[in-house]
Image: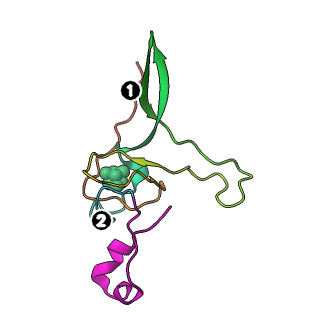
Amino acid sequence: MVHVEVSPKLKEDIAHLAIAATHVGQAHIAGTGPSGSTCEQCAFWHLWKKVKVGDEVREVPADAGRFSARHKERPGERKDALCNKPILNKARRKIPASAVACRFFDPKQPESKS
Ligand code: SF4
C-alpha cells in the first residue's frame, strides 16, 4: 500500500491532506466519495481469478480474502485488492480495504441467493 507522495510542506495545508491520504491505484482523491465509505464497500474493489469455461479461460471478479489470525502485521485483516474503475493511465496497484472512498464509489450490491 503506497500513498500518493505529497511534499511535507504541503501536508500542513488542509487542502492537501486528502491527496496525502490517497493510495496509488485509487481512481480519484480519497474522501471525495460518500462520507464514511471505504473501498471495501465499492463494487470496483476486487481481484480477478481465472476460471475455465468450456475450452476458454476467463477472468472473473474474486474476493481478496483475509490474512490469517497469525499474520505478523495484519492478523485477520482483509487483503488488499485492485480498484477496477477504468481510468486512463491509472496505476494498477493494490489498495487496502480501509482506503477512504473516492467520488467514483459504486456501492456493492448484496449477493442475491436464488
Ligand atoms: S471508491 Fe471505488 S472507484 Fe474509488 S478508489 Fe475505491 S474502489 Fe476505486
Could you say which quadrant of the image residue 11 lies in? Answer: bottom left
Establish if 50 lies above or below 68: above
Which residue lies under the disc numbered 2? 29
Whether residue 24 sits left or right of residue 86 in the image: it is: right
Q: Is residue 110 magenta?
A: no
Could you say which quadrant of the image residue 112 lies in? Answer: top left
- Colour scheme in the image? rainbow
Q: Is residue 6 magenta?
A: yes
Rate crowding at label 1 as few (under 14), some (14 to 19) or many (20 or more) other CA atoms within 10 Å.
Answer: few
Magenta stretch in the rendered image: 1-24
SS under mark 1: loop
Q: Position of residue 72 (x, y in %)?
A: 72, 59
Establish if 64 lies above or below 90: above
* Marks 2 and 1 in Cβ contact (< 8 Å): no
Which residue lies under the disc numbered 1? 112
Q: Position of residue 68 (x, y in %)?
A: 69, 47
Quadrant containing the C terminus in the rendered view: top left
Nearest the viewer among 37 and 13 is 13
Establish if 8 lies above or below 79: below
Residue drawn 41% across the image and 86% down it? 8
